[in-house]
């Protein structure tokens, strides 16, 4: 099997989908890996690193897409890549299709077979989304703290406070992987943490995890409204598997928040959980809404590409190896986890969540997997 590794084209996206060590494992298993020139440079991996792993370096993305039977990426394909996709090829990457009709249409029109990292599911968990959720969650208090600085447009609040001055108040929406990691780092910074979720069992776990040093609150619109107006930093970390994120913070609520407060939307890949959320880039990460500052970078882990690339390959490589060793059809037949991530094939959509979000017809994966 030929695995193609193109360079990411999203703005300020420095991650790459496969490390040289990952490439070496595939080569050892009898597969061929073709890598676009400089694909790994942003994450600190040179072309020679890939050559030494047994991969071939190609000078253009088009050649990688043309040769690759499996294309492995980090981010969803952008319009410039739509014409490179083809029928009979498997694309294995983050897709977030519920928030992107254009990408969904591009995949359907190309006939490409695709599996979305973010919906591969094992025992209710999302093993390929988890590492990037961990990274984004740990980054959120960092970028939020920076945005709170007066020079960045924030209120001038130091999250950890100092003796005699109360710490900043951080409200975390969602107690999943990203929310938990955000709370962990914010707590380590000395902030006052409040975390809301609708899963009582999860709130109990968080109470125990943080030894009662954070506040856990059952999530209702009224509770969020009360907490938001007192928050210095709100971190949106809600997730509905494969679907658009719910809008938990309205424009009218933002208008009531303290001047200079900051909202960081980790859920922006899934459409965002604030009404006013719009994707931003690392080059221009924030914008103002009323008197607040929004941070909605759609590829937050791209800011730390070395760590992110290593973490991502650790998670995806076993599945990529399975797809390469068995072929995608047999791998999907054998793996309920991959079935959950199966998104498109030969012009048909197979994700119920995406179909519901975009109003598109959906085929049953079991038609292919049986």
Image (cartoon, grey):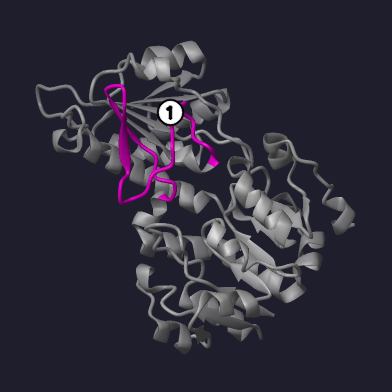
Q: Which residue occupies the foreground of this view, 139 or 28?
A: 139
Residue appearing at x 47%, y 73% in the figure: 19
Give percent across and percent down for residue 43: 37, 68
In-image side of 190 versus 323 (left or right): left
Residue 338 appearing in the image: no
Per the rendered image, the range of residues in magenta is 270-299
Residue appearing at x 17%, y 35% in the figure: 149
Q: Which residue occupies the foreground of this view, 184 or 109?
A: 109
Residue appearing at x 51%, y 43% in the figure: 269
Q: Main secondary structure of the magenta part?
A: loop
Give percent across and percent down for residue 166: 17, 22
Give percent across and percent down for residue 52: 45, 89
> Which residue is the site of mark 1?
276
Residue 6 appearing in the image: yes
Quarter of the image where the N terminus is located: bottom right
Q: Which residue occupies the foreground of this view, 241 or 109?
A: 109
- Whether residue 51 appears in magenta in the rendering, the answer is no
Q: Quadrant of residue 214?
A: top left
């Amino acid at each position: 099997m030929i695995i193609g590794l193109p360079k990411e084209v999203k703005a300020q996206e420095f991650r790459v989908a496969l490390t040289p060590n990952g490439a070496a494992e595939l080569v050892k298993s009898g597969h061929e890996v073709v890598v676009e020139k400089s694909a790994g440079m942003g994450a600190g991996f040179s072309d020679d690193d890939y050559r030494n792993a047994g991969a071939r370096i190609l000078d253009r993305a088009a050649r990688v897409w043309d040769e690759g039977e499996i294309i492995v990426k980090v981010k969803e394909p952008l319009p410039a890549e739509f014409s490179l996709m083809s029928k009979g090829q498997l694309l294995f990457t983050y897709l977030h299709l519920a928030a992107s009709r254009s990408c969904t249409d591009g995949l359907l029109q190309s006939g490409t077979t695709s599996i979305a990292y973010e919906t591969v599911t094992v025992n209710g968990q999302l093993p390929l989304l988890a590492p990037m959720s961990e990274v984004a969650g740990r980054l959120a208090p960092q970028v939020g703290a920076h945005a709170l600085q007066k020079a960045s447009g924030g209120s001038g609040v130091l999250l950890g406070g100092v003796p005699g001055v109360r710490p900043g108040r951080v409200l975390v929406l969602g107690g999943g992987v990203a929310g938990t990691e955000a709370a962990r780092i914010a707590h380590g910074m000395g902030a006052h943490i409040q975390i809301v979720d609708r899963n009582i069992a999860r709130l109990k776990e968080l109470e125990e995890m943080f030894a009662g040093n954070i506040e856990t609150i059952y999530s209702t619109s009224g509770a969020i409204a009360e907490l938001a107006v007192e928050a210095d930093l709100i971190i949106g970390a809600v997730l509905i598997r494969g679907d658009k994120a719910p809008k938990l913070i309205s424009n009218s609520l933002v208008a009531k928040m303290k001047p200079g407060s900051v909202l960081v939307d980790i859920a922006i890949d899934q459409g965002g959980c604030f009404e006013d959320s719009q994707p931003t880039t690392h080059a221009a990460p924030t914008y103002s809404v009323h008197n607040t500052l929004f941070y909605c970078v759609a590829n937050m882990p791209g800011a730390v590409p070395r760590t992110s690339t290593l973490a991502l390959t650790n998670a995806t490589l076993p599945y990529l190896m399975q797809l390469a060793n068995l072929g995608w059809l047999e791998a999907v037949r054998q793996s309920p986890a991959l079935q959950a991530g199966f998104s498109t094939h030969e012009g048909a959509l197979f994700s119920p969540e995406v179909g519901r979000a975009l109003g598109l017809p959906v085929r049953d994966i079991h038609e292919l997997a049986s």
